[in-house]
């Protein structure tokens, strides 16, 4: 089966510019996660969708970050405007149901964002 | 809130056994997961402990003690390809909180 797809793989922008990332989860997976991983740290959950509804966005900086999953399949994460501290790898993951810990998350390759 | 502690780096030789510890403080707890991440790669699932005790999957084993808020990942017969970062993650309902990771260096 195809894995989680993300694009672009790399992006370099200047501060105050906007950027968008795209994720296509594994077919049939109801839950989609966006994580931010700063170099040397563990992934930090930004937002979690169950189908097209938001389950948790408590750590999403809503003044500049937004995300949507309109049809309950693919998703877009946007940053507007970007700051230097947004430089990180943005990981998308999906799981079948988003239930208990036995529900494995499958990660995409990530988008490495550099803000200059 | 959630707080997880792991050693930042561990070094071991090929063929040896290494244990990576994880202690946590959480407001709610469902289980403990472990993920492996090679440099430049995506995290991949290794194991999950929902109950106290040892779970074994090939060369890897994971242990959980809820009363001690403690778990570990045990890697046996280390191979060079095991050089990677290892993250423990607390599972709270359907949410995951990752530790900062342990970088494992396997030397010949």
Image (spheres, helix red, strand yellow):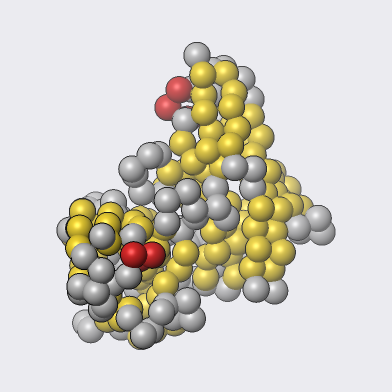
Nearer-the-camera pick, B62 or B107 = B107
Q: How many marks?
A: 0
x then y, percent, for residue A28 = 28, 68
x then y, percent, for residue B71 = 70, 49
Taking B14 as reference, is A16 above or below it? below
x then y, percent, for residue B37 = 43, 43
Nearer-the-camera pick, B86 or A101 = B86
Instruction: Please give left or right for residue B20 compared with residue B108 in the image.
Output: right
Nearer-the-camera pick, A107 or A78 = A78
Quadrant where the image shows the C terminus of chain A: bottom left
Taking A111 as reference, is B16 above or below it? above
Instruction: Please give left or right for residue B91 compared with residue B64 in the image.
Output: left
Residue B72 visible? The answer is: no
Picture residue at 64% right of the left edge, 43% below the top: B7
x then y, percent, for residue A96 = 38, 66
Picture residue at 37% right of the left edge, 78% below the top: A49
Q: Quadrant of residue A19?
A: bottom left
Taking B54 as reference, is A71 above or below it? below
Picture residue at 40% right of the left edge, 39% below the top: B38
Q: Quadrant of residue B58?
A: top right
């Amino acid at each position: 089966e195809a894995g989680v797809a993300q694009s672009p793989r790399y992006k370099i922008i200047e501060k105050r510019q906007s950027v968008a990332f795209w994720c296509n989860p594994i077919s049939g997976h109801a839950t989609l996660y966006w994580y931010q991983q700063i170099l040397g740290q563990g992934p930090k959950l930004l937002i979690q969708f169950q189908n097209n509804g938001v389950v948790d966005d408590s750590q999403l900086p809503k003044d500049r970050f937004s995300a949507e999953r309109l049809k309950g399949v693919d998703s877009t994460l946007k940053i507007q405007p970007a700051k230097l501290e947004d430089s990180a790898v943005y990981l998308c993951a999906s799981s079948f149901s988003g239930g208990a810990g036995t529900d494995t998350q499958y990660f995409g390759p990530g988008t490495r964002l550099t803000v200059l | 809130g959630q707080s997880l502690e792991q050693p930042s780096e561990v070094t071991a030789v090929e063929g040896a056994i290494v244990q990576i510890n994880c202690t946590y403080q959480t407001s709610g707890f469902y289980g403990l997961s472990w993920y492996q991440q090679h440099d430049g790669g995506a995290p991949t699932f290794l194991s999950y402990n929902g109950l106290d005790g040892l779970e074994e999957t090939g060369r890897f084993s994971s242990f959980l003690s809820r009363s001690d808020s403690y778990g570990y990942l045990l890697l046996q017969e280390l191979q060079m390809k095991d050089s990677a970062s290892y993250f423990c993650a607390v599972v709270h309902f359907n949410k995951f909180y990752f530790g900062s990771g342990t970088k494992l260096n396997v030397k010949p």
